[in-house]
Amino acid sequence: MKPTLPPLTLHGITDETPKVLTSELAEEIRQLVPSRLQMHSSWSLLYSLSRDGVSLSTLYAKSAPTSKMRAQNVRSGYILAVKDTSGNRFGCYLNEPPQIPPNGRYYGNSECFLWLDDVNDVFKVFPYSGLNNYIAYGEADYLSIGGGDGKSGLWLNSDLSKGVSDQCLTFGNEPLSRQGSSFNILGVEVWIVDPLHSSYY
């Protein structure tokens, strides 16, 4: 029998802060992250478009592990959450922070997945298919999650104003936004799921 999880607390937001990730949506995603992270009841907001500005470079910088985390090789998880101008929410779980990979290669592992929660509160998840290794990749002018045949499961531009979501081989997903392949962005957040988050922030 699966143990009952303690209620989840989201740190870094206030009642006045425009939110992409709600408590209810976070609990849905929590059931899908690796079991080693599910018992941890605190998630911390690393980056928010409304709080930190419209810049992909800022998102990368805010998401980077601290020196203490690197020293102790902490195995964290990261939730990227996007809200389009129609109110659909979607994103991904990554086992590494959104970044420009120093080796120029795709990063991520089989724990990663895409998710969506549309305006009708229909929640869906798209796990890693194993068909390719194009899980996550970043450059200064874009962030891409999933790939194959020239399609990205989720793609964001440099000023986080526009994105693209197509069906991709990596996750076998449907387009995440109900606006179609291309969508306009209202909000973006990055959350960390960290067993010892209070020791590092």
Image: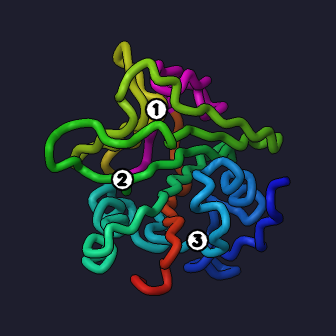
Residue span colored magenta: 160-182
The x and y percentages for residue 199 are: 44, 86
Amino acid on which disc 3 is placed: Trp
Q: Would you name the residue on which mark 2 appears?
A: 98
Instruction: Between residue 67 and residue 101, name the one nearer to us.
Output: 67
Structural distance between the alpha carbons of marks 1 and 3: 27 Å
Q: Is residue 102 left or right of residue 50?
A: left
User: Marks 1 and 3: which is nearer the front?
Assistant: 3
Q: Is residue 167 positioned above or below 27 on the image?
A: above
Residue on which the image places disc 3: 43
Residue 83, position in %: x, y?
60, 50
> Looking at the picture, how far across and down is residue 158, in whole percent?
31, 48
Q: Along the horizontal axis of the image, is 128 left or right of 66?
A: right
In-front residue for pair 37/9: 37
Return the disc, 2 or 1, that comes first in the chain's sequence: 2
> Element at badge 2?
loop
Tag 1 residue: 164
Is residue 178 on the magenta stretch? yes
The disc labelled 2 sits on which kind of residue? Answer: Pro
Identify the residue shown where x is 61% and y is 32%. Answer: 126
**Mark 1 neighbour density, 10 Å: few (under 14) some (14–19) many (20 or more):** many
